[in-house]
Image: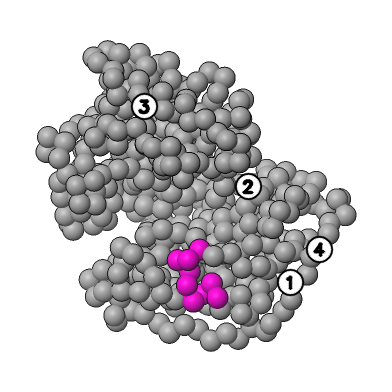
């Protein structure tokens, strides 16, 4: 049984009752976190983010926390509460910084002591959990190689340890604004804490680097129309906002996009989409998303009761040209349902543009989890009308970007880069994927990609 299967079996089938550990004792000393004032010539101040996301290097990041601070976040990771600590990177120490665990249902499943996997709670039970480091802690103005935050994804549900890095690479190679990702080693108080995926934060700095006009609003997990075609409320807009929060922002650009799509009839939808989105960029995003069978995003409308909505994506609006852009996010369950549905929850029933069950919620997958057809939404249905453009970018992905030769070379390079860290994890932890299982998962990933190229 793989690590993923064990976590899902324990958490959902057994309710966690036979899988939890006790909260580990606090073996670390109490320390006071000093304030280090940089001189201005430190590498982390003079360098830029290209150094952090260098694909040729596996770098190590060391966190130092007081024993009580570490015990506090271990006692309740799902609170996602920051504690104060230090970041040591190569020859520099950045102190203080904010440190917390991060995640959602998928990030915490099987890794906290609570028995309800749909509402994670309790103390930390896995050796690794995803973490976020806040460089701009307590108003700090310095940046870390230009970055305000670092986020380390545990990859607990990805035995191949490649989903984030490969998925975002494919999006970016296709011209889609997407985060950069590399692998990284993490240490906590001098002890090896595991191999993580370091994924670029989507924030104001990301917008500046990926768009000519950076003055617009960035939203997380907000869809222009709900399943009854209602426009989100101002409160929902503000809750989803990730930039301009303190600038009395207007939501008119995104609202007008939703209103236009709601009232569109016939061919009007495709005209609106041409005017309000970069359709080459959008079709490239869709082609990659559907080829790698990305869970979440705009095509998996999960249902709770009779309410359904998509999750885990960002929108950015450009004020100058009034265009909106989708930014992909959260790829840990991508790639696994290409040949067949390996995961009991994440498969999407419909092919792009198809509709099932007359737009009513329906059960799908081995656990009969409820979903709704994405193409019931006017925006998704409008995208599906661009048949020729979709095919053009699909041919470009499969015939150029995702060829067997180029991707195998990338995976071989990254595999060699992290092999020693995978072995190190096995020597330190008893709840991580074994080296043989990792190699089997890598082989399966390559089989999934080959199937996608030829099917």
Of mark 3 and mark 4, the one earlier in the sequence is 4
Q: Nearer the viewer, residue 73 or 255?
A: 255
Q: Residue 414 has which mark?
A: none
Give x and y (percent) for residue 447. Answer: 33, 48
Of mark 2 and mark 3, the one earlier in the sequence is 2
Asked whether the residues under the numbered discs 2 and 1 touch, taking CB atoms below 8 Å apart as contact, a structural biologist would say no
Of mark 1 and mark 3, the one earlier in the sequence is 1
Of mark 4 and mark 2, the one earlier in the sequence is 4
Report, in whole angstroms, how far the alpha carbon at label 3 lies from the one at label 4. 47 Å
Give x and y (percent) for residue 242. Answer: 53, 42
Report, in whole angstroms, how far the alpha carbon at label 4 lies from the one at label 1. 9 Å
The residue mark sitting in front, 1 or 3, is 3
Query: What element does badge 1 sit on?
Result: loop
Majority secondary structure of magenta residues = helix
Crowding at mark 4 (Cα within 10 Å: few <14, some 14-19, many 20+): few
Asked whether the residues under the numbered discs 4 and 1 touch, taking CB atoms below 8 Å apart as contact, a structural biologist would say no
Residue that mark 4 sits on:
36
Residue that mark 1 sits on:
33
Pick the quarter of the image with the C terminus.
Answer: top left
Residue that mark 2 sits on:
53
């Amino acid at each position: 049984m793989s690590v993923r299967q064990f976590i899902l079996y324990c958490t959902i089938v057994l309710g966690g009752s036979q899988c939890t550990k006790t909260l580990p004792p606090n073996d670390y000393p109490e320390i006071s976190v000093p304030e280090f004032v940089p001189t201005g010539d430190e590498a982390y101040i003079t360098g830029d983010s290209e150094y952090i996301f260098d694909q040729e290097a596996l770098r190590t990041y060391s966190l130092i926390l007081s024993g009580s601070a570490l015990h506090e976040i271990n006692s309740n990771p799902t609170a996602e509460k920051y504690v104060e600590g230090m970041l040591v990177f190569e020859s520099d120490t950045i102190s203080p910084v904010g440190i917390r665990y991060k995640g959602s249902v998928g990030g915490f499943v099987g890794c906290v002591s609570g028995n309800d996997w749909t509402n994670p709670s309790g103390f930390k039970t896995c050796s690794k959990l995803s973490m976020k480091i806040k460089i701009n802690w307590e108003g700090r103005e310095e940046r870390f190689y230009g970055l305000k935050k670092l986020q380390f994804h545990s990859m607990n549900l990805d035995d191949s340890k490649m989903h984030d890095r490969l998925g975002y690479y494919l999006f970016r190679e296709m011209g889609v604004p997407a985060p950069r990702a590399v692998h990284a080693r993490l240490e906590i108080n001098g002890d090896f804490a595991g191999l993580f995926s370091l994924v670029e934060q989507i924030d104001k700095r990301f917008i500046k680097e990926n768009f000519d006009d950076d003055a617009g609003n960035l939203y997380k997990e907000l869809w222009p129309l709900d399943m009854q075609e209602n426009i989100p409320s101002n409160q929902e807009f503000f809750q989803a906002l990730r930039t301009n929060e303190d600038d009395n922002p207007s939501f008119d650009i995104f609202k007008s996009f939703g209103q236009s799509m709601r009232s569109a009839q016939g061919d009007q939808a495709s005209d609106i989409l041409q005017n309000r989105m970069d359709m080459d960029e959008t079709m490239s995003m869709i082609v990659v998303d559907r080829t790698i069978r990305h869970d979440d995003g705009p095509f998996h409308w999960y249902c709770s009761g009779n309410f359904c909505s998509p999750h885990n994506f960002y929108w950015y609006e450009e004020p100058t040209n009034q265009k909106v852009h989708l930014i992909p996010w959260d790829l840990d369950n991508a790639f696994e349902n290409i040949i067949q549905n390996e995961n009991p929850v994440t498969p999407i029933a419909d092919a792009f543009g198809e509709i099932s069950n007359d737009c009513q919620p329906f059960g799908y997958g081995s656990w009969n989890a409820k979903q709704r057809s994405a193409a019931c939404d006017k925006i998704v249905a409008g995208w599906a009308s661009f048949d020729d453009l979709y095919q053009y970018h699909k041919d470009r992905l499969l015939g150029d970007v995702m060829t067997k030769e180029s991707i195998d070379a990338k995976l071989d390079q990254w595999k060699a880069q992290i092999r020693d860290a995978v072995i190190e994890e096995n020597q330190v932890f008893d709840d991580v994927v074994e080296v043989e299982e990792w190699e089997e998962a890598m082989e399966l990933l390559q089989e999934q990609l080959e199937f996608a190229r030829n099917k």
